[in-house]
Image: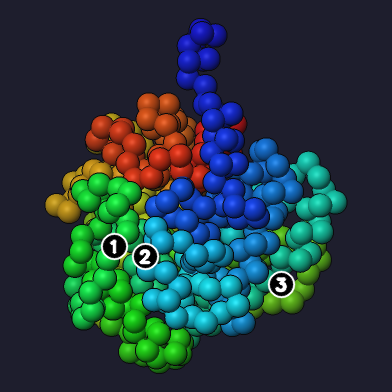
Amino acid sequence: MSQKKQQEQRIDVEAAARILRDNDRGGYSVPTHGLYPFQWSWDSAITALGWMKIDEQRAWQEAETMFRGQWANGMVPHILFHKDAESYFPGPDIWGSNTAIPSSAISQPPVWATAIRIMYETCQNRALAEEKLGTLLPKLIAYHDWWYRERDPEDTGLVCSYHPWESGMDNSPAWDDPLDAVPEVDWTYQRRDLGHVDADQRPHKPQYDRYLYLVDFYKRHGFDSQYIYEHCPYKVIDVSIVSILQRASSDLLELCRHADYKSGVDELENELARTGTAINRLWSGKRHCFLNHDLMSGQPLDEVTTATVLPLFGGLADTDQAAGMCNLIGEWLAATKVGLSSTHPSSARYESQRYWRGPVWLHINWMIARGADDYGDPQLAERLRSSARDCVMTSGFWEYFDADTGDGCGGDNFTWTAAVALYWLAS
């Protein structure tokens, strides 16, 4: 490739760094102005990787600020409402959590320990990293213990989720059937997201009615974890959460070894082994991936989404399973214009630009590429990386991308997209 061609295809690092700085609110990052004016947990974890490329102190601050909102039971909420904002719904009044830092009452895919391991191992300022790791380790242990204790009280090895928002993949077609069994909320409300993004890129109203019913359900029952486990009308095993937790727990063990930290390590090792065995119950030889599971109906959720191949990232697949998923991903990549679409394009429910029903999300493409590399398929990993770069090079730093056209969708100047570009695509 000519030098001129290489320059034309170079990620605009300065533009990506500027987005992080523009979306910095003094110790935490908002995903984008207006649409998401608060701190989201897994957004912040990915964002911290981007900050590591330009300001290590600020990267560690991102983590510290998120963990200041950790609940007494160990949960890290999926949203911290640091300041009032009228541009987002539902806000802290709807959640009703009554915490020191107003927050939501559910969590999000627990990618923090993975991010912190990367930060620790790639840092330039070793003394700063040692100091911050010492502070964060007990909080990470408590967070992982919350997942295993509260979301798998029967010790099955497979944690469950009580809300589509908790998956981070809010309106994935995998959640359609279990969500249909949830009642609709019986009060009126005004969505704010449609004032920022076209309606054809966002979840439908009937889904929002059910999302809000579940928020009400937790509040009505005082966030009682045992009651919710026994009575919540939505309860699924989300392969993406299981996989991200597995990798994060493995990374957390490694961090504990680095720091010679002993508390909770034996329990963590036991949980990793339990999940490593249990995951095989979700394998589908027909689909060549692991399927999500509806605990209410007892049935697998027969939709192939990026969640269903994330066991590559979690190190949960055996050799044959990994080969099957890598072959599936290779064919999948060839079926759309850019990136790996969040839902397989053969699905009857596929929509190339509607949030998690088809669009490409770069942080998920990074996770899957990392998994493919771990399982000995660097060519597939590079295909994923190259296709993700095409999204940014063609359209800029959008929240997600239309898989069929490459057009940017959702919020523009999006923090974690810029962070992924800095950490993964520009490296």
- Bin the neighbour count of mark 2 within 10 Å (Cα to Cα): few under 14, some 14-19, many 20 and up: some
- First in residue order: circle 3 vs circle 1: 3
Mark 1–mark 2 distance (CA, rounded to whole Å): 6 Å
Residue at horizontal 70%, vertical 42%?
A: 55
Tell me the kind of residue under disc 3.
Pro
Mark 2 — residue?
89
- First in residue order: circle 2 vs circle 3: 2
Identify the image quadrant of the C terminus: top right
**Between 424 and 55, which is closer to the camera in this rendering?**
55
Q: Is residue 279 above or below residue 232?
A: above
**Between 211 and 381, which is closer to the camera in this rendering?**
211
Mark 3 — residue?
138
Tell me the kind of residue under disc 2.
Phe
**Between 403 and 303, which is closer to the camera in this rendering?**
403
Mark 1 — residue?
191
**Between 335 and 30, which is closer to the camera in this rendering?**
30
Classify residue 207 as left or right of residue 361.
left
Q: Can you tell which mark lies on residue 378? A: none
Residue at horizontal 69%, vertical 49%?
A: 58
Mark 1 near mark 2, Cβ–Cβ under 8 Å? yes
| Element on which disc 3 rests | helix
- Bin the neighbour count of mark 1 within 10 Å (Cα to Cα): few under 14, some 14-19, many 20 and up: few
Judged from this view, the residue extending furthest toward the right is 127
